[in-house]
Structures are given as C-alpha cells and as structure tokens.
Image: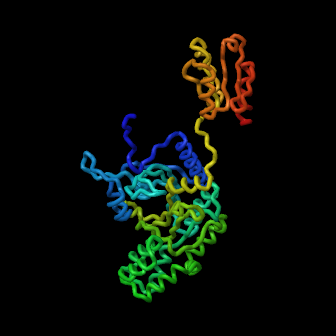
Amino acid sequence: MKNIISPVKGTRDFYPEQMAERTWLYSTVRRVSESFGYQEWEAPILESLDLYAAKSGEELVKKQSYVFTDRGGDEITLRPELTPSLARLIAQKQGELTFPVRWWSFGPFWRYEKMQRGRSREFFQWNIDMLGVDSPEADAELVAIAATFLKTVGLTPQQARIYVNNRRFMDAEFERLGISETKKAEVSSLVDRREKMEPSAWEANALEIGLSTQQLDGLKGLLADSGAWQRSEELVRLFAALQALGAAEYVEFDPNIMRGLLYYTGTVFEAFDVSGSVRRAILGGGRYDNLLRDVGGEPLSGVGFAMGDVVISLVLRELNLIPPLVVTPASVLVTVFSRELQAESLKLAAHMRQEGINVTCYPEPVKLPKQFKFADRLGMKAALVLGPDEVANGRITLKDLVNGTQENLERAAVLQSVIRLLERH
C-alpha cells in the first residue's frame, strides 16, 4: 500500500456521511438563528494578529493562534475566534447600520490546543450576537436562543444546562469582601480556574495572590450561594425575561461561571452536558461593552455566544439524537441499458430534474444488476429503466428498490408514479 500523507494533526476529513452531519448541524443553527430574526454574515479566515492582540487575551494570541508572517512582512493569523472580526465589521460601517444588529455565522476556526476528547485544532463554530442594546433583556434573548437550540436538537433540561452569572455583580461582591480593584482580575481568573483544580491547590493559590483567610472564606461562601443572583438587579431582570421567553427551565445561576476572555463585562453564560460522559461546555458567551473601542469604533454594547461543532456532536451522538440523514441527495437512478440508448437515459434524467426530482444517471452501460446494486448501496429508492422495448413502445419501467417490485408505465405517468413512490418511502 502506498504511503498516504495524513491530514494535519487536529484537523478532520469529512466524508459524505460526516458532511451530512455537519450540514444538518448548520441547518439547525440556521433555523434557530433565523427564528429570532438574526442575519447571516461572514468574515475572512485570515486576519491581522493585531486584531486579536487588542482584546482576546494573551494565551489565545501567543499560545493558541496559528500565526505566520506573510510575504509583505505582516503578522497574519488563522482566525481563532470571531468576535474581534465582528467588532471590526461593525466599526467600519457603524454610521450606516441599523441597530440593534442581530447577526450569526457558522464557519471554520483554528486553535493550537492540546488534543483531547471534545477538542480539535480545526473546528466549526456558530457565532451569534446582538449589538446596540445594553439590557438584561437583550442578554436573555441570547440565552433563550441557546436554550431553543438545545431543545431543537432534542436535549432536555436534565441532559444539558445553561449556567449564568454576571461580571458586574461579581465585581460588586468582590468589593463587598474587601478585594481591591487591582486584585479583581486575578480573583476572576482564580474563580474561572476553580473547577480545573484540587480544592487544596485552589485555596493555596488564592492565598498566594494575596487574599486573606477571611476573604477566601467569604469567596467560598459566595461561590456556594445559589441564591446570590437575587442581590443583582440585572440578574433578576434576566431571569424574569427568560421566564417570559419560555427558556427558564434550561437555565440556572452559577457564581463559578466567569468566562476566561478579557472582554466580557456583564452577563456571562455557558451550556454544559450534564448527563452523559462528555461533561464539557457546549457553548459559552456573554456581554462585551468595550470591544468596538479597541478596534477603532465608537463604544457599543454587545452580547453573544459561540458554539463549536465538536462537543455538541459528541453529546448528540452519545445520546442518539442525530436523526437519520440523507447522504445521497438523489433518490432516483436512471439506468443506461446500452451505448445506443444512453442519450435517451440522459434526456430522461434531464426531464426529471426539470420537474424537481433529484436523479443520478449511471455514467456507462453495464449490466442492470450492477446498476441496481450501486443505487441500493447509496440508499436510493427507485430506478428507471429504458431498454429497447420501453423506447419502442413509449414506456418506462419503474423499479422500487425498497421492496423489489416494478411496473411498466406510460411515459406520461412516470413523474407522478416516482413522486408517489418517494412519498411512501
């Protein structure tokens, strides 16, 4: 066997079966996004590194981005996320757009991360954002979109949960605990790391960054207080809006949710698999009030989230929630009886396509059983046969590939017979 060059580590080949799954996910994302009135958009796959250096965080820029210097000497990166690109697009036409802007996108991204289950270096991601409104009700709409997606793909509130917090609320709580302004970013990062660390190591880390024992006890009490959200007017309004939107059953408050990226300023949220073996974040997002300013635009409030395709696909496969998918778009095969009659088969295939039926015409005259086997292996439902007798008598044989029956039909009756057969199967 020849030595076949493997794909780049962390990337995936998409055979038609995997492509059908990706297309189904994309279609579901589109349906949910458009049901809330969001418009599709896209940005370049290549961006200036400076765009991400402005706000994405040192780890993402220096350790996870695929960066190269182009022939003109500019530092370019394969986009690791989309929010900075969104900010640039909005800033470029800020005076022309109609606000609030509601946009969504689904496309490829790259991050040089450690390979593990649920994480690849090339991935497809749904991004959805609203810009131009700063309110808990706008935040609730994005959380409700996430909940609607979970419900649409068949995940119940017992299988997937959305955990919500608020950065401004946490900053106020830090202040109440006597944590200085200069320490808040470090403490936020500490909270964000809590689930990844042993309790003793986490507490030791808290003392190392300068928290007193009393402050640490207060912080632990805060992080265990599931009713703390009632002290936040923003969170009270958020949960009221979620109740009105019919999404509250999927959502709960969790003060441990902080989100690592630097630009979040208010509401933050993440959805998790809570019933299967994946137990990873499905999606995450929040409010970012300062991002446009960092790419040269006027300050503008925004809220949004992102969902990669890898984790959600693992979760849905494990729970058998991916529906049977059509891998072969054509359900009908037009056979070729002989070289002399091939043109007749091509004409018939063209006619069926003009009538809205997806058909495949076999590319050469081989024995009919081989053509039927080809169609059956691709999951086609019907085959049309044009042999010498059919052509001479103005008829066509329609073979049902599901149950093996066949009938000889007048040409005029073939279209409706094919439609009825496809409706049965």
Picture quarter containing residue 274? Answer: bottom right
Q: Quadrant of the N terminus?
A: top left
Q: Is residue 46 above or below residue 227?
A: above
- Return the x and y of residue 382 as percentages of the image width and height: 67, 29
Q: Is residue 61 above or below residue 377?
A: below
**Whether residue 90 is visible:** no
Q: Is residue 265 left or right of residue 363?
A: left
Q: Is residue 46 above or below residue 411?
A: below
Q: What residue is rendered at 56% in x and 62% in y?
A: 273
**How does the figure colour the protein chain or chains?**
rainbow
Q: Quadrant of the C terminus?
A: top right
- Return the x and y of residue 238 as percentages of the image width and height: 59, 71
Name of the residue lying farthest toward the front: 1
Number of numbered markers: 0
Q: What residue is rendered at 63% in x and 31% in y?
A: 376
- Return the x and y of residue 61 as percentages of the image width and height: 34, 60
- Return the x and y of residue 277 as percentages of the image width and height: 55, 61
Name of the residue lying farthest toward the bottom: 214
**Whether residue 404 is visible:** yes
> Observer-nearest residue: 177 or 388?
388
Q: What residue is rendered at 63% in x and 58% in y?
A: 155
